[in-house]
Image: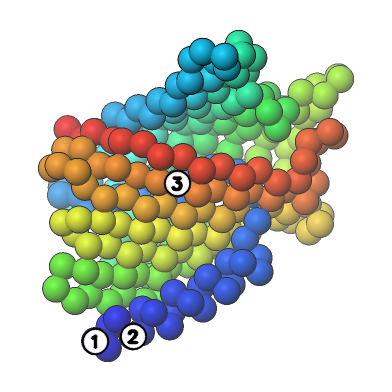
Amino acid sequence: MKLSTNFSIFFIIYCLYSIKVSHAQVNTETLRKNDLQHGFHSTAMLNLGMVSGNSEFLKLKTGIRTDYVCQKYYLFGVIQYQRGTKNQKNFINKGFIHLRNILRFTDRFNVELFAQKEFDDFILLKDRNLIGGGIRTELLSRSADDKNYRFFIGNGGMWENEEIRTSPISETKIVRSTNYVSIQLQNNNHWNINFVNYYQFNLENVTDYRILMESTFGFKLTSSFSFQTNFNYRYDNEPPPNVKKYDLELTNGISFSF
C-alpha cells in the first residue's frame, strides 16, 4: 500500500512537470533494456499501417538491435527506419543508428560513451553525427513483488555535426550539453512504462536548445511477442528555416524477441 501511495504522488508530480516543460531528437533512454541476462540478445521490429481505395496510405517502421551484457559492461546497437507515403507522396522518411557503451561503476552510478548517425527529411536534416558521453545516476529504486519503479538523472556533453537541406547546404559543428530525467515502471511478467524528458543546449548559445518528451507503454502478448505504444513530442527553439518548432508523433506496433 505504501509503495502504491508513494508512486501515485510521484507520478502526479512528474505529469505536472511534463505538462509545463516537455516539448526535442531521438530518445535513446527508451532504447535501454534493464532486465537482460548476461550474454548476447537480439530483437527485430516491424510496424505497418496501410489504407487502400479512395486514399492511398502506407506507414512503415522497422528496426533491429543487438545487446551484450556482462558484469561491468552493457553495450547495445540499434538501427531504426521509418517511411510514410500518402497518395504516392512521402510524408515521413527518417532513420538512425545508435551505439552505446555503458561502464557500471556501482549499482547506481554509470559512465557512458555513445555515437549516433541520423537523418530526417521533413525537418530538413540531411545528416546528424553525434559523439559524446556522460554520467547516469539512479536516485530512487523501489520494488514490491514483481513490480518496481526507478528514477534516473543523466548529465553529459556531445559533439554535434549537422547538415541542413538549405540552399546552399548549411553545416554546423558545435558542442551541446545533454541532460535528462527518466522514470521506469515495470511489472516483470506483463507490462512496462517509461517516461523521459531531455534538455539539450548549445554551450556557446543557450537560446539554441531542444527539449524532448517521450512516453512508452508496452505489454507482453506471448513470451516472444509484445505490443507497444509510443508518444513523442519534440521541440527545437532554433529550427531550420520554414520548419516548425515542434513535432508530435504517436505510434503503435508489435515487436518480436529471439
Q: Give the camera-side residue of 88 and 178.
A: 88
User: At label 2, which amino acid type do we have?
Assistant: Thr
First in residue order: circle 3 vs circle 1: 1
Residue at the extreme front: 54
Q: Which residue is mark 3?
A: 230
**Dot 1: element:** loop
Vertical comparison of 192 with 252: above or below: below
Callout 2 touching callout 1 (CB < 8 Å): yes
Q: Quadrant of the C terminus?
A: top left
Residue 201: percent from left, percent from top: 70, 55
Name the quadrant containing residue 183.
bottom left
Vertical comparison of 209 with 242: above or below: below
What's the residue at 43%, 79% (across, down)?
Answer: 10
Local crowd size for mark 2, using a 10 Å CA cut-off: few (<14), some (14–19), many (≥20): few
**Dot 2: element:** helix
Q: Give the camera-side residue of 43 and 5.
A: 5
Q: Which residue is mark 1?
A: 1
Q: Quadrant of the N terminus?
A: bottom left
Q: Give the camera-side residue of 155 and 151.
A: 151
What's the residue at 66%, 69% (across, down)?
Answer: 20
Q: Which residue is mark 2?
A: 5
Name the quadrant containing residue 110.
bottom left
What's the residue at 86%, 20% (across, down)?
Answer: 167
> How many marks on residues?
3
What's the residue at 15%, 47% (across, down)?
Answer: 38
User: At label 1, which amino acid type do we have?
Assistant: Met
The CA span between labels 2 and 3 is 26 Å
Vertical comparison of 196 with 242: above or below: below
**Dot 3: element:** strand
Residue 242: percent from left, percent from top: 84, 33
User: At label 3, which amino acid type do we have?
Assistant: Asn
Query: Can I make out residue 184 in this image?
Result: yes
